[in-house]
Structures are given as C-alpha cells and as structure tokens.
Image (cartoon, rainbow, N blue to C red):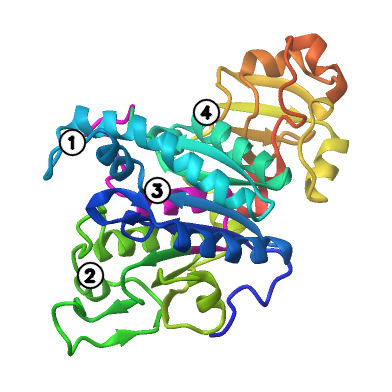
C-alpha cells in the first residue's frame, strides 16, 4: 500500500507517539529535530484537508528528569508528581513545534473513566469534535496526575485506540521502534518474519507480540495488538510503523508497516453499539415531522419531541417512539429527563432561556442515533 490517505479527501487520523521516539533516553530531553520533522509531516496532512489528533507519551519521562528522580521503577505518587511537571513541558514542546507549522495545539488529558462513563464520554467526544471543527490539533495524554493504579490504561497505545473509537477515526497510526509486526521480537530473533497485513486478530497473532524494547514506555507490541483489536472493532484501520525522522512522510511514500484491517466502519460500529449493547433508560415520543427528519438522516430536535418517559441522565440510551407508538430507533440523550421535559416542543434558540445554559442543539444527535433498521427485534 502506498499513501493510506490518498483514497479520501478528508480522513480523521489519530497518531500515537511513544516516549522512546519523543524523549532522548535517560537525559529526558525532547528530540527537537525529530519533533519538528513530525510536525512538518502533520502540517502537510492538514493542508490536504485531513483532520488530526495526536496521542503523545512522554510526560512522566520529562518530569522525571526535571525532578531528578532516581533510576528504576517509581512509586505511584512519584509517577503522578513527575506527570504533573512533565505535562507542562510536553504541552509546551508540542505547542511550539506545531505553531512553527501554523497549527494551533490543544492539550487534552483523559482517564479511563472519561471513555467508559457515558456522560464523561460525551463531554470528551464533544470537546474533541469542536477542536477539530476549529482546526485545532488536540494533543492527548493519559491524565497520570489523577489516575490511580486501578483505573489506568497502562499505556498510551490503548488510550489512542479508545480515542480513535470515541471520535470515529478512519486511521490509527502507532509509531514504534519497529517497522511492523513480526512473528517474534526482531531485536532478539533475526529470523523473525515480517507481516504486512493482518486481516483478523487471532490468538496466533497475539502470541507474536513481544515486550517493549525501549525501556522508556509502559507498552510494547502486546499493547499495540490490544489497541489494534479495540480500534479495528470500532471500524478504524490501524498501522504500526517505525517512528523514524519524518515517519509520517515515510509511511505515505510506501515505507514498511503492518496494517490491521477494520472489522467494520466507524459509523456502523457505533450504531451497532447504541442499538444492541446499551439498555434504554427512558423513552422519547416524537411527532411525524421529527420521524421524517430522522429517516432523512437528521438529528432529533426538541421541537419534535412530544413526551418523555423515565428517569434518565444525559448520555443515557433512550428509545424513540413514532406517532404510532412503534420504535423508530434508539439513541443517546443529550439531556437528562428533567431537562428534556422542559424542552418539549421548543425551538433550539429557546434552550438558553429555559435551562439557563446553552446546551446542545439536538435532543439526540444523528451520530448518537440508531434507527429501527439497526435495532434488534
């Protein structure tokens, strides 16, 4: 495969950068030349109309150096302190490097709960969507300062996969210290065979994963396989490639990599999750006009909602019933049941006056909606 983005005028791409690529060994300094080259590649991607989100490791490594912490494993509180210092340095490095390419950087810190708990999930997803609309480049890192040992991702490969799934990314690029997946660790076994395409992640593929060889990151090939499973099940193509100088440019010119094929499309995966996995917590009754709008691919606005049943919170799944009482679909409500009742039949521009805050324009956004055809019977 040559340029993976050539087939689309606008791909949504998540790129994960590991500590070993960004940080120059035990000294804890940013590899500035490498970072500038990567940002130049990013700028070219954005100029072509593609959208970009970065998941970057390196905060703990930068903070550890600044605080002169001892070599070896750190206690949890030491890692959190290092992250608090390093996150400032990491954000500054990315912001300055992206600014030299006329790109605006935004720092986003996430924990596991932010992608698992639905209300936080919706908030994080909406924030990232808005940043993309405003042409800002989100630089995401796990919020190590507040995360505990029990709720950590453990590595940013899986964080990147969760982000890709959350925002419906087309591609997840995992840059590593190897140029793809091999049948064994190529640093230890010279006869290891390179694999260019993985159609399905099987136990045999998982058994090929080796441990991290860099000594800086928490992940390794095993975490990349786990990330690929998450992302491909969400409809995202995944690539593992070497993080050399101008790594993205090299990838687009046909550089060696391993590609994991998506099991579905991002939209289909999300709608299947809404339709078949989440238990509805309430019901919205809609009028004929709203039903026609939904079938035309539009969102459900408050003006089309006639009645609300149940006691649900923002982000909970709800059933949507048409005028005849039959289920028209299921979706994630942008409002609690209490607020939804206050907005019945009202126009979007009335929302601030009624609720005292701006809120969402739609009661259920079309991206958070699965129509009856996708709802199991």
SS class of the residue under badge 1?
A: loop
Instruction: Note whether 219 is above or below 363 in the view shown.
Output: below
Q: Are marks 3 and 2 in contact (CB under 8 Å)?
A: no
CA–CA distance between discs 3 and 4? 18 Å
Magenta part of the chain: 146-172
Choose between 356 and 216: the one closer to the eye. 216
Instruction: Note whether 251 is above or below 313 in the view shown.
Output: below
Choose between 37 and 148: the one closer to the eye. 37
SS class of the residue under badge 2?
A: loop
Q: Position of residue 360 (x, y in %)?
A: 72, 28
Choose between 364 and 58: the one closer to the eye. 58
Q: Which of the marked residues, 1 or 4, is nearer the chain's N terminus?
A: 1
CA–CA distance between discs 2 and 1? 31 Å
Provide the residue designation for mark 1.
69
Provide the residue designation for mark 2.
209
Circle number at residue 244 = none
Provide the residue designation for mark 4.
119
Q: In the rendered image, is residue 329 in sight?
A: no
Instruction: Note whether 127 is above or below 238 in the view shown.
Output: above
CA–CA distance between discs 3 and 2? 18 Å
Q: Which of the marked residues, 3 or 2, is nearer the chain's N terminus?
A: 3
Q: Residues within 10 Å of mark 4 (few under 14, many from 20)?
A: some
Q: Are marks 3 and 4 in contact (CB under 8 Å)?
A: no
SS class of the residue under badge 3?
A: helix
Q: Residue at x 21, y 74 (%)?
A: 208
CA–CA distance between discs 4 and 2? 34 Å
Provide the residue designation for mark 3.
159
Q: Position of residue 87 (x, y in %)?
A: 40, 36
């Amino acid at each position: 495969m040559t340029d993976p983005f050539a087939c689309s005028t606008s791909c949504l791409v998540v790129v994960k950068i590991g500590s070993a690529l960004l940080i120059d060994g035990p000294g804890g300094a940013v590899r500035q030349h490498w970072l500038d080259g990567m940002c130049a590649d990013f700028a070219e991607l954005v100029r072509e109309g593609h959208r970009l989100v970065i998941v970057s490791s390196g905060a703990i490594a930068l903070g550890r150096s600044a605080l002169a912490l001892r070599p070896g494993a750190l206690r949890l509180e030491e890692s959190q302190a290092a992250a608090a210092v390093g996150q400032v340095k990491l954000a500054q490095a990315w912001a300055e490097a992206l600014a030299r390419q006329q790109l605006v950087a935004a720092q986003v810190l996430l924990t596991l709960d932010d992608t698992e708990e639905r209300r936080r999930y919706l908030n994080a997803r909406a924030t990232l969507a808005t940043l993309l609309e405003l042409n800002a480049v989100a630089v995401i890192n796990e919020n190590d300062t507040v995360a505990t040992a029990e709720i950590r991702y453990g590595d940013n490969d899986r964080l990147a996969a969760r982000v890709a799934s959350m925002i419906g990314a087309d591609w997840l690029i995992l840059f590593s210290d190897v140029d793809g997946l091999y049948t064994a660790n190529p640093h230890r076994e010279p006869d290891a065979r390179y694999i260019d395409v993985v159609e399905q992640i099987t136990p045999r593929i998982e058994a090929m994963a080796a441990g991290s060889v860099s000594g800086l990151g928490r992940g390794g090939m095993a975490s990349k396989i786990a990330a690929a499973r998450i992302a491909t099940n969400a409809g995202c193509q995944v690539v593992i490639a070497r993080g050399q100088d101008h790594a993205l440019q090299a990838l687009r010119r046909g550089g060696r990599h391993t590609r994991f094929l998506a099991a579905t499309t991002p939209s289909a995966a999300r709608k299947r999750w809404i339709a078949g996995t989440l238990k509805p917590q309430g019901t919205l009754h809609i009028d004929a006009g709203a039903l026609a709008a939904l079938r035309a691919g539009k969102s459900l606005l408050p003006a089309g909602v006639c009645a609300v049943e149940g006691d649900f919170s923002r982000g909970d799944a709800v059933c949507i019933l048409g005028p005849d009482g039959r289920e028209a679909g299921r979706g994630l409500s942008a409002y609690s049941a209490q607020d939804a009742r206050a907005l019945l039949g009202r126009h979007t521009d009335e929302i601030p006056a009624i609720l005292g805050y701006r809120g969402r324009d739609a009661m259920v956004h079309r991206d958070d909606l699965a129509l009856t055809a996708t709802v199991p019977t």
